Amino acid sequence: MGNQLDGRTIFITGSGGVLGSTYVRRMLNEGAKVVATDLEGARADALVEAHGSNPNFGFYHLDVGDEEAVTGIFQKVMADGWQPNVVLNNAAITGEMLMGAGQPFPDFADTTVNDFERTMRTNLTGAFMIARQMDRDIIGKYPASLINVASMYALNGAHHPIYDGMPFKNFSAYGVSKAGIHGLTVWLAGYWAQRGATVNTISPGAVFNGHSEEFQRRVGELIMQNRMAQPDEIADVMLFLASPQAGHMTGQMVNVDGGFSAW
Ligand SMILES: NC(=O)c1ccc[n+]([C@@H]2O[C@H](COP(=O)([O-])OP(=O)(O)OC[C@H]3O[C@@H](n4cnc5c(N)ncnc54)[C@H](O)[C@@H]3O)[C@@H](O)[C@H]2O)c1
């Protein structure tokens, strides 16, 4: 058990997913208190099952696209005795989630405005609403930091052919929302700098989650290190960004992508 995150209370959205659940486990191991949130469902249940007995762990259902719920969330967790000083805007809809398992993935020409807007609502408007609520409830009252989660597809286009014949594809609104995420980071960095808060973006590359050998080979060819990341490799950098050692960093995008963005 380390202590890199002693004194940190870390609030995480979408924390039941592949990366979110890794951050929760690693942050608890580093001495942080973790306030985890996610939609109702199996992922949330699994997280509570894994950590519910840990006194440093709290869990709240939260849909980041629900304005009323986001507006009340920090007051609610503070009333329960948590004082978040690090916030992770981690929740996102990926293409797979949007379409639901087993449904054919639509081509760009068949993408509905509704699908596009649902993705933007969670990935970007949700992140904005969490940041705005931080501004109202936390910023200026005590030092804090916000970590926004973008993607290797925020500032680089998707390599569409690697998805040929795969059950999932890269979805237009995903990259658009993730580019917006970094816009939010740089806008807020200057806005909050004099009020004791930092804000940065982490951009994970391709993270292994049971992908086929063929997909690993295709995406690996686009990555300098020729392989996908393990979730713990993204968490290693996330732990640093959430720690006091990152105190002089603000407005930055940190790529953790095996060199994908550096060719
Ligand atoms: N896995 C990757 O390869 C990868 C790469 C780059 C960036 N990312 C980003 O990292 C973050 C975490 O990704 P992941 O791989 O763990 O994804 P994931 O799909 O495993 O988890 C996403 C989580 O977000 C939650 N979520 C979805 N809609 C929500 C809403 N409206 N309100 C609250 N929670 C909601 C889901 O329930 C889920 O637990 C995301 O922002 C994702 O875009 C992931």
Image: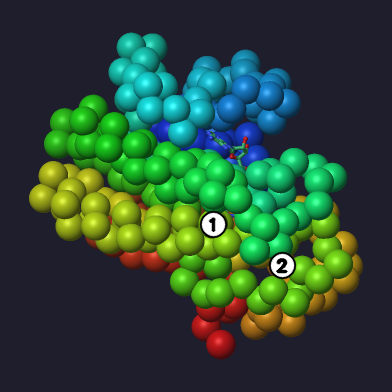
Above or below, comparing residue 218 to residue 79 in the picture = below
Quick check: can you spot residue 195? yes
From the image, which quarter does the C terminus lie in? bottom right
Q: Nearer the viewer, residue 260 or 243?
A: 260
Q: Residue at x 49, y 36 (%)?
A: 13
> What kind of residue is marked 2?
Met
Label 2 residue near ligand 1, CB within 8 Å: yes
**Image coordinates for residue 68, horizontal then vertical, percent:** 37, 22
Which residue is drawn at the image coordinates 81% and 52% (left, top)?
104
> Which disc, if any, is residue 173?
1
Q: Does 201 appear above or below 165?
A: above
Q: Is residue 216 visible?
A: no
Q: In the rendered view, does 124 fall on the left or right side of 60? A: left
Report, in whole angstroms, how far the alpha carbon at label 2 lies from the one at label 1: 23 Å
Q: Residue furthest top?
A: 79
Q: Quadrant of the N terminus?
A: top right
Q: Position of residue 194 (x, y in %)?
A: 11, 50
Q: Quadrant of ligand 1?
A: top right
* Residue displayed at 74% across by 82% down: 221
Q: Quadrant of residue 166?
A: bottom right
